[in-house]
Image (cartoon, grey):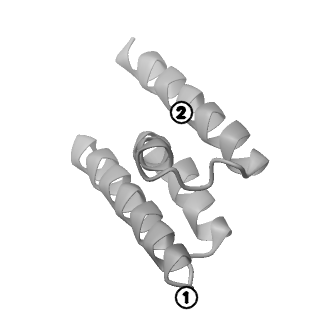
Amino acid sequence: MEYCIIAINIIAFILYGIDKLNAMRNAMRVPEKTLLALALAGGSAGALAAVYIFRHKTKKRLFTILLPLFLILHLSLLAYLAL
């Protein structure tokens, strides 16, 4: 289970980076629904890290609100399962 969470966070981080690179090159972008779905599916830490490291999607209110909420949700779930 831990490996799946690590993998989805790495995938989310990489896809956010690819989307930023494609945005700078005016190339085909990763859909926002895909980026948010990855974050919701467990990749919120990787997505949030990518947002700050790549400075990507920082002006999109949807991302600035949902990504921290997803992270809080995931950490709460993790704490609940640990007890």
Give the side of residue 67 with respect to residue 24, left or right.
Answer: right
Write the residue at 58% across / 30% down. 73
- Decide: few, some or many residues near mark 2? Use Cα within 10 Å; few <14, some 14-19, many ≥20: many
Which of discs 1 and 2 lies nearer the camera? The answer is: 1
Q: Which residue is mark 1?
A: 28
The quarter of the rendered structure image containing the N terminus is: top left
Mark 1–mark 2 distance (CA, rounded to whole Å): 28 Å
Circle 2: residue type: Leu
The quarter of the rendered structure image containing the C terminus is: top left
**Compared with residue 41, is residue 78 higher up or lower down, i.e. above or below?**
above
> SS at mark 2?
helix
Q: Which residue is mark 2?
A: 71
Q: Residue furthest right?
A: 61
**Compared with residue 79, is residue 29 higher up or lower down, i.e. above or below?**
below
Q: Residue furthest bottom?
A: 27
**Compared with residue 37, is residue 58 higher up or lower down, i.e. above or below?**
above
Circle 1: residue type: Met
The numbered mark, 1 or 2, whose residue comes first in the sequence reads 1
> SS at mark 1?
loop
Write the residue at 77% across / 46% down. 61
